[in-house]
Amino acid sequence: MIPNVLGWNIRGRTLESRLAETGFVGPGFDEVRLAAAITVLLHHAHSSIDDAKADLLFAFSGGFLHFGLLAVLVFFAISGFLVAPGLVRSGKVINYATSRALRIFPALAVVVISSMILVGPILTTLPLPRYFSDAGLPLYVKNILTLTYDFLPGVQLPGGHPAIVNGALWTLHFEVLSYIALALMSVVGILARPRLVLVVFLAAYVLYVANGIFPAFAERLPGRFVTFISLFVYFASGVALSTFRRTIPYSAALAGLAFLILLASLASGAGIVAAPLCLPYLVVFAGLSNLPGRSFIRRDLSYGVYLIHAPVLCCLSIMYPAIQSWLFAALVAMTVTLPLSYLSSILVEQPALTRKKIVAGWIGGRLNLIRSTMVRLVRVQDIGT
């Protein structure tokens, strides 16, 4: 049971009661995730043909936000809301880490290796022996560890510039860092104390806003840290919504108000202040709602779409440079990506996740063995002295 630490007397439905109504499975999260993944696809298709700054949301928000980044923020907010409760209930960091690793890395490894041995040889301007012996090829393997490397040997755009093979992968590094931060919050006891969860979110929020309002302040911080905060604040907001779900209303009126505030803030240049407060609530409200199209979505294809669409668009840009319609490019990419995402779901993602208890048990057993071995060594040393 989550304590009502804010002391609010909530009448009517809350996020917690809505979760209970749905069997603690938000009925709309698969649709929201898939919509976000397709939005990233559309954004990359648009930017591959037209100027990325021609994005309507980019212009509307005064350069603060474009549709691709909006979709990424949606993913981070959902992750924070959905992954925190299990870790709070069990407190088993090994199980949590295993589940997150099996969700991220198997499909990522398949996409990275497939890009190296299929996409690269098809697109490269180098002879195949030179391609496979090039010193740059092993660098692409770093993507499996979410250490982004964008290029494959000899893979070039029609203008001769090196092609970014999978530009969507950069966010995974910061998603993994957010998962690690949540694990640390559990280990040190923050997740068990709701007020401290709120403190973490507020600290991230203040840093995020300060970085945006005071560029000189952001310049003094490492660039990777600034990027991490700009994404983690939405993850932390999702965690906070989960932590206080017993006291936060599930309300269409509140969602409508959050949407209006978000629109007004984006139009007025204050998006950085309102977005971390409004967007995660809108995402969670949608995820807990019955959205149209659920009967057509039997699997969560969003991760596959996110991983696969960019190499497909890269192939289109290089093999068919005459394509001038980004909508046509997006349609072709979606036609190819969705079936591959389905195969990824049934052949890679789901089989990996079904083994999480086995893997977690094996890791726990190895750690216990190491711990007992170290204890014995210490005892032997004590006896020897």
Image (cartoon, helix red, strand yellow):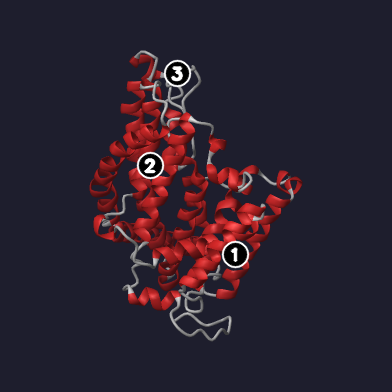
Few, some or many residues within 10 Å of mark 3 (<14, 14–19, 20+): few
Q: Position of residue 3 (x, y in %)?
A: 51, 82
Q: Position of residue 154 (x, y in %)?
A: 43, 19
Q: Which residue is mark 1?
A: 201
What residue is drawn where x is 42% and y is 73%? 89
Q: Is residue 355 left or right of residue 6?
A: left
Task: Name the foreground residue: 4 vs 11.
Answer: 11
Establish if 315 lies above or below 245. Answer: above
Q: Which label sits on residue 307?
A: 2
Q: Is residue 138 visible?
A: yes
Q: Nearer the viewer, mark 3 or mark 1?
A: 3
On the image, the x and y values in percent for residue 220 come to 73, 45
**Of the image marks 3 and 1, the number of the one nearer the N terminus:** 3
Along the line of sight, which residue is nearer the eye, 3 or 101?
3
Labels 1 and 2: the sequence-earlier one: 1
Picture coordinates of residue 221, whole percent (x, y): 70, 47
Q: Which quadrant of the rendered structure holds the N terminus?
A: bottom left
Q: Is disc 3 placed on a helix, strand or loop?
A: loop
Q: Amino acid at mark 2?
A: Leu
Image quarter for residue 313? top left
Give the position of the C terminus as an image quadrant.
Answer: bottom right
**Callout 1 amino acid:** Phe
* Image quadrant in which you'd find residue 365: bottom left
Determine crowd level at label 1: few under 14, some 14-19, many 20+ residues with C-alpha closer than 10 A.
many
Q: Nearer the viewer, residue 378 or 28?
A: 28
Q: State how far apart marks 1 and 2 are (Cα).
A: 29 Å
Instruction: Identify which residue is drawn at 38% across, 73% down.
Output: 19
At mark 2, the secondary structure is helix
Q: Which residue is mark 3?
A: 158
| Residue found farthest to the right | 216
Give the residue type at disc 3.
Answer: Pro
Foreground: 257 or 205?
257
